[in-house]
Image: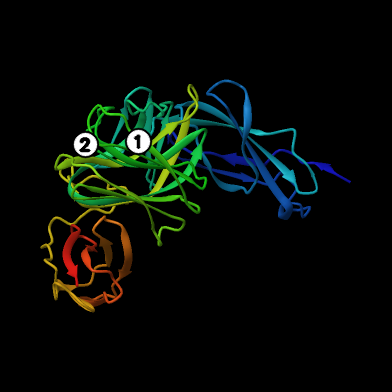
Amino acid sequence: VFYTCPAPASATGPATVVAAGTNGHFTATPPLGSVEGGWANDMVYHYEMETEAGSGIYEMACEDCSGDVDIAMPNQPGVYRMRVRAEYTAGFPSRGFIELIVKVGGPEGLPSPWTGTTVGEGSGEYSYNASAEAFSIRTDATNYDLAADNFGFIHTELCGDGELVVKVESINGPGYGGVTVRETNAPTAREAALFSNLSPILRWEHRDRPGGAKQVRTFNALFPSWLKIQRWGDWIFAYSSPDGIRFYYVNAVNIPMNGCVNLGFGAYSYVPGVDATVVFSNVSITGGVALSGGGGGNSGGVQQANTESLPLEPSLFPNPATDQITIRLGGLTEQPTSLRLRNNLGQLIEQSRLEVPAERTEWNVSGLNPGLYFMEITTEGQPPKVLRFMKK
């Protein structure tokens, strides 16, 4: 026997305006009589929201959900109606419903030091969800013109060396999301970028001279939802990771750029005329980041270099080395510190995390071929340091 459930006894939605693209909180209570009858323990709710503000056309926003739930709001501001229905798990949804009015406002502004810009042709919407610490780019720009770049870009200024790590949290529509370093935001500027569509295929592109054609390559990677791009002198390195812990080298290129560049993450659609929305989380940046304003804005969970602490001056010996090198950090540090060994092409050979507190460490180089090597030292709150040494 199947039963048609009555409408919920009550339902509530957000009491204030909810920013577009963020979550709104909704509640619902069991129909009258269902608690006494023992039905409330097997109750679910359906939340149906208008597809467009005032359209009267509804689609399921949350099916078989609880009576206490967060639901993603539309990306377009407006006044929407939400219908809340109840259902016994051994029955049919209620024909009756409670209708709520939900006011969706403009997207939240980007936290300092980030700026949203559309590079080249197309449009872009840029928002930040403070509760989820996630950035969102919605764009119709397509990025397949080799003569010019077209994509939505959230960026900050990087002066000197540094790196950016992001997680491509989700992609809605035919899109790519990725990380990039650009000399300027002109569509024909020098640049290097690594993009993912959350498939095993990564898209790498770079342009080594202004106005030149960009070069595009693809690489295979396992679950490449985490991306990292690093600037080290004239070298740009790109990495991917399935978990945000183990990063694997993808590609590198030598492109001389200005001392200060635009570092950030971007998105584009690969179907003309169709929007793509890409959400980025776990945004972390280290290096010479220029903070805007007075530095008192919401950082949005972004890690930035501590410009108030005294910089460490690491060193290593012996140089040239035969079997082992000793790395001095230049002082006792209690901050997370990572070491990366690269060859003379900038390719990553080995990496390690120090157990802190630490002041020095040893590194076995007996298995290296003779030649020039680089030891990159990254300590949280400090700019990256690179030491050169010769292996005999």
Q: Is 108 above or below relative to 220?
A: above
Which image quarter: residue 105?
top left
Q: Position of residue 52 (x, y in %)?
A: 54, 24
- Closer to us: 335 or 233: 233
The residue carrying mark 2 is 183
Q: Residues within 10 Å of mark 2 (few under 14, many from 20)?
A: many
The reply, left or right, for residue 93 in relation to residue 221 is: right
Q: Residue at 51% of width from left, 39% of height from top?
A: 72
- Judged left or right of residue 20, residue 237 is left
Q: Quadrant of the C terminus?
A: bottom left
x then y, percent, for residue 221: 47, 51
Q: How is the image coloured?
A: rainbow
Please report the residue visible at 40 percent of the width from the left and 35 percent of the height from the top.
267
Give the label on residue 215, or none: 1
Q: Considering depth in this image, is 362 or 354 the residue closer to the camera?
A: 362
SS under mark 1:
strand
How many marks overall? 2
